Image (spheres, rainbow, N blue to C red):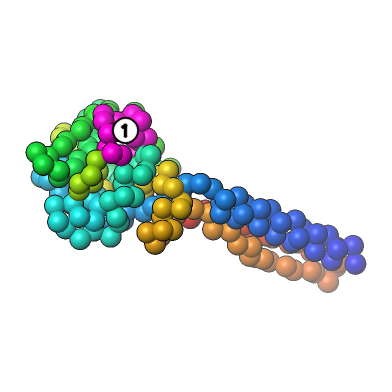
Amino acid sequence: MKKVVAIVLVLIMTLALSTAALAEEQKSATTGVALGAPNISSSDQVAGWAGDGHNDTAAPIPQAIFWAATGISIRISKDGDPEATVGIILTSDKVGGWWAQTDFVLKDVLKPNENGAGGVISIPFSKLKDGAAFATSTNGAAIQVGYWSDGIADLGLVSATLSGVPRALAEELDVPTTGVTTFIAIAALAVAASGTGAVVVSRKLKKQ
């Protein structure tokens, strides 16, 4: 009986923690918006993500989401040259065009994968040239990555996620968001004939 009570208490506590985490996520003022695979390319060395309306193209994410974000995380599949320069470029197709480029050394901004090649480059817009002005542009928002040591294919752009997007705006524009997904799974509940048993509770608080 005591073991059964203990199991029930563990489940109740886990449910409470999971529910609290989900409630906190739902209250969050900002969220992330996944951009998916790159949808524009300026050259063999530059590619990235454009919002809907950039150069009159149809993109899945509204430009307003780009302007409202405060940063970007870029997933790559290859290691590249750690000493090479990688540029994060804010662009607009307004009259005359606009190209604001900030260069970084790859090893300084890349968080490598623990297993396998590649990793994630996370950059807040506050560290980018004209990052604040980007939020006030009115035409064709796009964010691109330049890799001039080799072609952009040698960096292996996989996907990107905009961060700091106001949740209310994402909901208003009906844009899917990333965040916390909470669930409880009882992985095992075995009580042996001897009277000993084990409870394994799995909680997942991750969605990317």
Residue located at (9% from left, 38% from top): 96
Residue located at (15% from left, 37% from top): 98
What residue type is disc 1 on?
Ala
Reply yes or no: does residue 16 show up in magenta: no
Between 156 and 92, the one nearer to me in the picture: 92
Specify the segment rendered in magenta. 121-136
Between 77 and 73, the one nearer to me in the picture: 73
- Rendered-image quadrant of the C terminus: bottom left
Reply yes or no: does residue 133 show up in magenta: yes
Q: Position of residue 34 (x, y in %)?
A: 36, 54
Residue located at (35% from left, 30% from top): 126
Residue located at (28% from left, 44% from top): 78
Identify the residue at the far right of this view. Answer: 1
Kind of element beneath mark 1: helix
Q: Residue under circle 1?
A: 132
Between 62 and 163, the one nearer to me in the picture: 62
Badge 1 density bin: few <14, some 14–19, many ≥20, Cα 10 Å: some
